[in-house]
């Protein structure tokens, strides 16, 4: 009883002292200038200390994130399902143990959860689980790691791509020195070449025949001219033909099974049939190339899950840095988008949201700007409905390439595009001596004996830039110096 009484008395005394001090402090703050200034300086110092502490904490997290992402990038992750499951459970268990040890172990816990994320088949799903089950501060550190990894991959992209054995590198082109200032990157040789030297060969990301040539004399997959009996597939609504069993199997696994093998048993025209009709009746290959490209992305993601192996950069990583045309939305594109969204939505969860209007138009703009015409030695009626980069008149289709796309236009190019195997594998061949560090330039159009005005008009109407290559500038300068009719008569 005495203890309780003493405690209550003590609390009362402390309360009285506290109230008295508060009254004194408020009086001094309003009536004593020196006290007020000292109090303000104290507040500023305290604010600085708090700010400094926050910055130290941020720096600590930033440094930890950089070190952790570098560590994870060097780690070899398991590839088979059983090993993945064990690794995942071990990392989650370690993370939970570290969380229980207190806030000072939160960063280490975040690293464990981040590593678990690397082997989980559906990262987005796991992030949602993390948001509900672990502290927000730890989730934020995981987000920081993911963001830093993306930025790191982007910054290092051109250090790793193109592969060194392709003998080229991609560099930024400044506007002041560029012959084509609408392109911000260009392709440069990494060693010397002589006329006739093959600089590199490249497989396409996506390719397609002109639709009126499908089911005819060319392979739908590699675009090679058929010799012998073609191979076809009764389940394929597109009725494509192939030059070999290999091309047939690749086409079916990469895109054809997903895009063209469903027949609606209700009697209604299926989305697959509608896509076939859209492509063939309109003789348009770019919607088909986009559909194949998207299907190929799905195939790549599926293979990652099956094999446990992942390329350092995805197909999407490769194309997002390429230049593009601005494709304004209209009824034609709106119908294409609607059809592809409905087709993919029934087969691949999440793809309907992925195929947004913005993303579709961006992809179509990149294909239109960068695709090369695949030429043949046979006389082929030119398809003028869709633009391609080509200096040839006989073109059977188009190919979209990761590396070749970076080559800028010149009316006096130093390379030529060839298809020596008569398929869609592009070969870049030097036509002049090219020194290491020199930019590779191709012609997007047929130049021949065309006038400056004719060449520029085609480039401006299709690729939306005014050519200022050395040839055009030289001819422009010559034209300006020609005497006028009036000065000649004098």
Image (spheres, grey):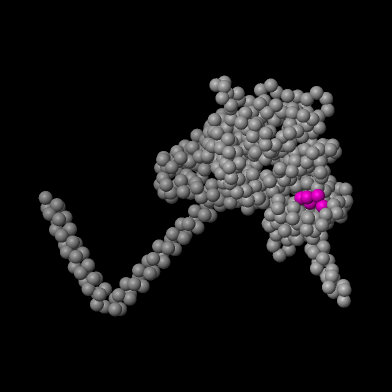
Secondary structure mostly taken by the magenta-highlighted segment of the chain: loop
Is 146 located above or below residue 123 in the figure?
Answer: below
Kindly give the residue lying farthest to the bottom in the view shown.
33
Is 220 located above or below residue 33 in the figure?
Answer: above
Name the residue nearer the viewer: 78 or 8.
78
Report whether 370 appears left or right of 63.
right
Report whether 351 appears left or right of 174.
left
Residue at (53%, 55%) from the top-left corner?
A: 63
Name the residue nearer the viewer: 256 or 99.
256
Residue at (79%, 30%) from the top-left corner?
A: 217
Report whether 11 appears left or right of 92.
left
Membership of 445 in magenta stretch: yes
Report whether 128 appears left or right of 11.
right
Membership of 62 in magenta stretch: no
* Residue stretch in magenta: 443-447
On-image quarter of the C terminus: bottom right
Residue at (83%, 28%) from the top-left corner?
A: 227
Residue 83 shows up from this direction = no
Residue 84 position in % (x across, y down): 56, 33
Quadrant of the image occupied by residue 234: top right
Quadrant of the image occupied by residue 336: top right
Residue 247 position in % (x across, y down): 74, 29
């Amino acid at each position: 009883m005495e203890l309780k009484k003493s405690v209550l008395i003590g609390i009362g005394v402390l309360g009285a002292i506290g109230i008295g001090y508060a009254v004194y402090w408020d009086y001094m703050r309003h009536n004593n200038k020196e006290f007020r200034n000292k109090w303000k300086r104290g507040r500023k110092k305290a604010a600085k200390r708090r700010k400094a502490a926050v910055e130290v904490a941020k720096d600590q997290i930033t440094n930890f994130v950089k070190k952790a992402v570098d560590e994870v990038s060097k780690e070899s992750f398991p590839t088979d399902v059983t090993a993945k499951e064990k690794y995942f459970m071990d990392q989650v268990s370690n993370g939970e143990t570290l969380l229980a040890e207190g806030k000072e172990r939160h960063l280490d816990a975040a690293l464990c959860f981040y590593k678990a994320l690397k082997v989980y088949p559906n990262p987005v799903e796991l992030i949602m689980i993390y948001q509900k089950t672990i502290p927000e501060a730890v989730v934020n550190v995981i987000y920081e790691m993911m963001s830093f990894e993306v930025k790191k991959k982007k910054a290092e992209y051109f250090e790793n791509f193109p592969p060194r054995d392709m003998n080229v590198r991609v560099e930024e082109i400044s506007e002041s020195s560029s012959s084509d200032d609408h392109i911000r990157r260009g392709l440069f040789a990494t060693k010397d070449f002589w006329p006739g030297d093959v600089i590199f060969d490249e497989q396409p990301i996506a390719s397609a025949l002109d639709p009126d040539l499908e089911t005819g004399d060319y392979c739908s997959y590699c675009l090679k001219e058929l010799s012998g009996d073609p191979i076809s597939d009764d389940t394929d609504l597109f009725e494509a033909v192939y030059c070999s069993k290999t091309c047939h199997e690749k086409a079916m696994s990469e895109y054809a099974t997903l895009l063209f093998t469903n027949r609606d048993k209700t009697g209604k025209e299926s989305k697959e049939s509608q896509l076939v009709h859209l492509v063939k009746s309109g003789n348009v290959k770019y919607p088909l190339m986009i559909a194949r490209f998207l299907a190929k992305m799905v195939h790549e993601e599926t293979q990652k899950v099956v094999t446990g192996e992942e390329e350092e950069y995805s197909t999407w990583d490769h194309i997002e840095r390429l230049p593009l045309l601005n494709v304004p939305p209209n009824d034609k594109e709106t119908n294409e988008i609607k059809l592809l969204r409905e087709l993919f939505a029934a087969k691949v969860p999440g793809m309907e949201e992925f195929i947004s209007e913005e993303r579709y138009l961006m992809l179509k703009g990149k294909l239109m700007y960068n695709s090369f015409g695949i030429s043949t030695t046979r006389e082929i009626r030119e398809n003028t409905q869709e633009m391609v980069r080509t200096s040839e008149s006989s073109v059977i289709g188009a190919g979209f390439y990761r590396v070749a796309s970076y080559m800028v236009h010149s009316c006096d190019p130093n390379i030529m595009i060839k298809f020596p195997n008569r398929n869609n594998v592009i070969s870049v061949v030097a036509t002049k001596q090219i020194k290491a560090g020199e930019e590779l330039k191709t012609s997007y159009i047929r130049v021949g004996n065309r006038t400056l005005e004719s060449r520029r008009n085609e480039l401006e109407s299709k690729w939306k830039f005014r050519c200022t290559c050395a040839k055009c500038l030289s001819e422009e300068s010559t034209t300006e110096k020609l005497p006028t009719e009036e000065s000649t008569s004098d």
